[in-house]
Image (cartoon, rainbow, N blue to C red):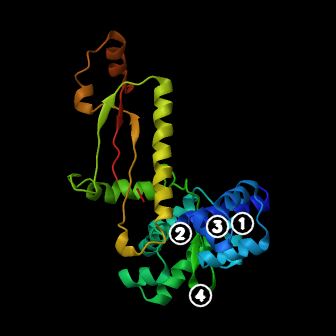
Amino acid sequence: MPHSAALLEALKRELRVRRITYARVARHLGLSLTSVKRLFSRNGFNLQRIDRICALMDIEFTDLAHVAVARTSVISQLSFEQEKEFVDDPRLMLVACAALSYWNLEQIVEHYDFTPAQCIRLLVKLDRLKFIELGANNRFRLRVSQTFSWLPDGPIQQQFRKYMQLDYFRSRFNSENELMLQVFGALSKPSRAALLTRLKRLAHEFSEMNRQDGPLPLGERQSMTLLLAVRPWEPLHLRALRRKRPETRQADRSGAASPPHRIAAAPGTRT
């Protein structure tokens, strides 16, 4: 992406995050709303106007430029070794999750048992892992994309299944902010592909909402964990009731497992 286009996209994104409308930009610049929309559509802003919009957003032009550059150097997954560092150091994992939720240093120290110096050391480690970029006055920004996810069957997912899965599903999922759906069906190959695409889109929308709500005070936000899962599967006690065909009996005698035939989807609540 050309640098000017990346800068414009960063400008649009920062305006959305701060819920600043084009109409407000127009009033600030002394232009009509139509003129401002035209400037955005044609990337017609000069540096002076961009600098004035940065003043409206209360950020420095250099901060906007850093955001634009960062879009070309974000990561969507960590390596196995990097995830292992998170698993081996629960405090590092906690600070990483806080960063994913757009907490700042002061908020982390206020809510968790860290001294500022301890938290800064963990932020430095996250910077070394290229998870965040640590700047002046211990301000930091994420270096992960909106499609960021943990490695399939990597250290984080293994830890969840071993230690946290039971705690997560202990809820009845019947309160105002909870939902669990379990649906059984038999889908064609095109339908299965469409379903996976929609689930990925839902995870992306969750990440976008998380980013947009980042500037809000913590009192107006609540930590949420969205868990999406779908796989060909049939419960073991139901699978045992299947009518056995001659080839299936032969497979049972040889020790081979019969393939699953159903899909179960269980959306819960992701970080």
Residue 146 in the image: state x and y as whole percent. 55, 56
- Disc number lying in front (1 or 2): 2
The image shows residue 152, relative to residue 257, as above or below, that is: below
Residue 113 vertical position relative to residue 26 in the rendered view, above or below: below
Q: Residues within 10 Å of mark 3 (few under 14, many from 20)?
A: some
Label 2 CA crowd tier, 10 Å (few <14, some 14–19, many 20+): some
Q: Which residue is mark 1?
A: 69
**Secondary structure of residue under mark 1:** helix
Q: Earlier in the sequence, mark 1 or mark 2?
A: 2
Q: CA distance from mark 4 to mark 1?
A: 20 Å
Q: Earlier in the sequence, mark 4 or mark 1?
A: 1
* Circle 2/circle 3 CB separation < 8 Å: no
Pointer 4 residue: 137
Three-letter code, disc 2: Arg
**Looking at the rendered structure, which numbered label has been put on residue 100?**
none
Observer-nearest of 70 and 95: 70
Residue type marked 3: Ala
Cα distance in 3D space between marks 2 and 3 = 16 Å
Q: Is residue 71 visible?
A: no
Q: Residue at x 48, y 51 (%)?
A: 205
Q: What residue did someone put label 3 on?
A: 26
Between the C-alphas of marks 4 and 3, the distance is 32 Å
Residue 224's quadrant in the figure? bottom left
Residue at the top extreme of this rendering: 246
Left or right placement of residue 160 versus residue 176 in this view: right
How far apart are the alpha carbons under marks 1 and 2? Answer: 20 Å
Where's the N terminus, which quadrant?
bottom right
The secondary structure type at the circle numbered 2 is loop
- The residue that label 2 is drawn on is 18
User: Distance between the Cα atoms at labels 1 and 3?
Assistant: 26 Å
